[in-house]
Image (spheres, rainbow, N blue to C red):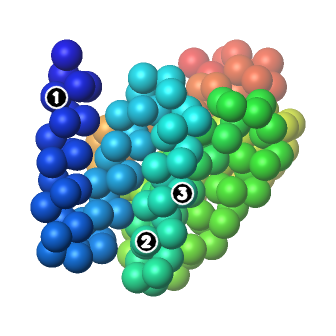
Amino acid sequence: NKYEKAKAHLNEALILLMRHENSLRIAEAKYLQGRIHMERTNDKDALALFNEAKAIFDGETNHVGSAKCLNLIAMSTVRLTNDLAQGETILEEAYILQKNVSPTSFKLETLRYLARLKMALGEFNQAEDALTEAIQVSEQLQDVAGDMHVQFEYILFYRRQNKMDQAL
C-alpha cells in the first residue's frame, strides 16, 4: 500500500531529523504525516499531527508553515465536529498569518477553504471576496491548476445561490 510505504519513510525521516534537531523539517514531516492520515479519513490523528507541526512552525515564527497547518486543522475540525463556525475562525487566523507575505499555494488554499465555509454559512458577500482574492493569488502565482480550483468554487458559489446561468 502506497500510504503505508509513505508513512514508513516519513517515520524513518523523522528519526533522522530528530537526531539532527532540524525543527522545520520535523514540522514538515509531521504535516505530511497528518496529510496521509487526513486522506485516509483518520481526522483525529491528522489533527494531532497538524497541531504538533503548527506548534513547531509557531516556535520558528514560520507563518506560512503555521498557516498551512491551520488550513488542514480547520478542515479536520469541521469533519470531526461539523462546526463550520469554528473552521471559519481557524481559517481566518490562517489568512491573517499570510496577509503580509508573498502569495503562496497555501494562501490560495486558505482562501478557497474560507470561501467554501462562508458559502455554507450563507455569508455570500464574504465568500465572493475570498474567491476574488483567490483568483488574484492564482494569477500572481501563474497557477493554472489553482485557477481551475477557484473556478470550481465559483460554480459552487453560484449553485448555492440558485444562480444556475452564472454557474455555467
Q: How far across and down, in percent of the image, does residue 160 sit?
A: 76, 24
Mark 1 / mark 3, whichever is N-terminal: 1
Q: What's under tag 2, amino acid-wise?
A: Ile
Q: Amino acid at mark 3?
A: Asn
Q: Is residue 22 found left or right of 62 in the rendered image?
A: left
| Mark sitting on residue 56 | 2
What residue sits 16% from the left and 70% below the top? 19
- Which sits in the foreground, 89 or 13? 13
Looking at the image, is 12 positioned above or below residue 84? below
Does residue 55 appear in this view?
A: yes
How far apart are the two marked residues, 2 and 1, measured between alpha carbons?
A: 25 Å
For marks 2 and 1, the one nearer the N-term is 1
Task: State whether residue 4 is above or below residue 146.
Answer: above
Mark 3 packing: few (<14 Cα in 10 Å), some, or many (20+)? many
Q: Quick one: 30 or 103, which is closer to the camera? A: 30
Question: What residue does disc 3 label?
Answer: 51
What's the residue at 42%, 27% (across, down)? 39
- In the rendered structure, which disc, 2 or 3, sits on the residue that comes first in sequence? 3
Residue 5: which disc? 1
Instruction: Give the structural element (helix, strand or loop) at label 2.
Output: helix
Question: Do callouts 1 and 3 mark residues in contact (Cβ within 8 Å)?
Answer: no
